[in-house]
Structure formats: C-alpha cells, structure tokens
Amino acid sequence: MTGTLVLAGTPIGDLADAPPRLATELTAADVIAAEDTRRLRRLTQGLGVQPAGRIVSYFEGNEAARTPELVEALVGGARVVLVTDAGMPSVSDPGYRLVAAAVERGVTVTAVPGPSAVLTALAVSGLPVDRFCFEGFLPRKAGERLGRLREVAEERRTLVYFESPRRLGDTLAAMVEVFGGDRRAAVCRELTKTYEEVRRGPLAELAAWAEEGVLGEITVVVQGAPERARDLEPAELARRVAVREEAGERRKEAIAAVAQETGMPKREVFDAVVAAKNAAAGS
C-alpha cells in the first residue's frame, strides 16, 4: 500500500481561519514538508499541536532535489503533509512538482481545503466573479511583463494576480499602458490581517496611489476586457459621439464614453469622429 500526499491549506493571515482538520493532519503526519520550517513551528504552536513526524524543508531552492526523496517515502507508505507559508500549496507556491511525481507513481493525493488569497481577493473586489482566471506573478523584467499582459489584453474573464509590494507601482503602470487607465481593478493588501486594505477604482487611479509605495502581501484583481463591438462602422461610432454631444457632453467626454461602452480604443473613436467631420466638410 502506498502512502498519501496531503496538500494542507494554511491561513493567509488570521490563524483563526485554520481548518480544524489541519491540526489533525499535522499531528498524524509521518513527514511534514514545509516551505519554511520556522513558520511551521509558529503555526503548530498557535494551533497547540506537537507534530510527531519528521519535518523537512521544501522550498523553491531544494524542490527539485527533495521531490524524489518525498516520493519514495510516499511509495513506502508514509503520510506526507505539505504546507507552504500561506494558502494552498502548489498555487504559486511549491507543490506542483511533488503532486505530479506522486500521481505518476500511483500515490493518493488529497487536500485539506483552506484559505486562498485568490478567492478571497476575488470575492471582496466588487468585480465580476462568475468567470475568472488566475495569472500568478508577472515577470520581473519590464519587457516580459508587458508581453504577458498583452497576451490577456482581450481576456473577457476577471484577472487575478499576485504581486510584490516593491513592483506594484510598475505593474499597475504597465496595466494602464496595456489595458487602459479606465479599466476597473482592486488592490487587496494584507488580506485577513490587522491592516487589511482593499483599494478599488480605475487602474490609472490605483497606479497613481501605488507610486508612493505600498507594504504587505498584495493581490490584484482586474476587470476583464469589455466586449469589443468590432462590427461597428466608423460612421456609427461618430454618430454615437454626436448624440452625446447634442445632449450636452463635451466631445472629449463623449469619445471616452463611447469607447467605454463599445470596447473600442479611444483613438479609433476619435479618428472616426474626425473622418466624419472631414466628410461633412467636403460634401
């Protein structure tokens, strides 16, 4: 009989969010693989449990080397519990490599459901939650980051990202460049912790706020792209702007509103207005 690999979700902030089964699994484990053994010690002390099994470190730096050792323990019948610093293992944390290797060897893999920064941020963002995709961390290099964002520029689903507080300003500025400053978003900081903060607003506004520097664990939720009305002719775009102008809106605001409601770039709407004006002048 092979053993069992248990992916154990841990609190992302408030220790009271720990699922009751977490303490049971930590107590019963033959081996606990922890991203940070010091954090594991604080966790077990907070839960009031004393693990009897062997504790080993399992983090990005030794994940490749330690995976075979853990798989052999599993194949030998051990119950291995994997915990990361916060949230669910393998979700932008160590774990995927071990899960894949365990599955390949026919080992049972299960989980202790727990808190998730992805779902928590999505739930409190105020943005659509019926369809979403998790994009993890963006690349650190500016060019690669812009490239990754351009890949999802037309994605209709709500987007969820993790980000370092040191790079948040640059990331939001890049999102403004690719998605547009009017796209709605939410920056969720220190979720479930003492200084929890959720900032909601247009990307341009959030980027300006982040320029001053932000601290803490960050999750960014971005509204999906609006449905583009690609079948609209330039004449129709110009007509919609003209209707708004006749109702009292200034041309700049009318163009922005039509761009927002149709999903068309402001530049294309502006060009349509100019073309219509030139056509009228030449007739």
Image (cartoon, rainbow, N blue to C red):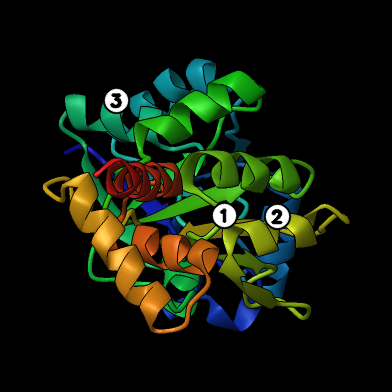
Residue under pointer 3: 101
Distance from the alpha carbon under mark 2 to that under mark 3: 41 Å
The answer to whether 205 appears left or right of 244 in the picture is: right
Secondary-structure class at tag 2: helix
Residues at badges 3 and 1 in contact (C-beta under 8 Å)? no
Three-letter residue code for mark 2? Ala
Which is more toward the observer, 260 or 94?
Answer: 260
Q: Earlier in the sequence, mark 2 or mark 1?
A: 1
Which image quadrant for residue 68?
top left
| Residue 264 drawn at (x, y percent) | 32, 50
> Does residue 221 appear in this view?
yes
Which is more toward the observer, 140 or 93?
Answer: 140
| Residue 188 drawn at (x, y percent) | 61, 67
Q: Residue at x 79, y 43 (%)?
A: 166
Of badges 2 and 3, nearer the viewer stands 2
> Does residue 117 appear in this view?
no
Q: Earlier in the sequence, mark 2 or mark 3?
A: 3
Q: What's the mark number on residue 207?
A: 2
Residue under pointer 1: 181
| Residue 227 drawn at (x, y percent) | 22, 56
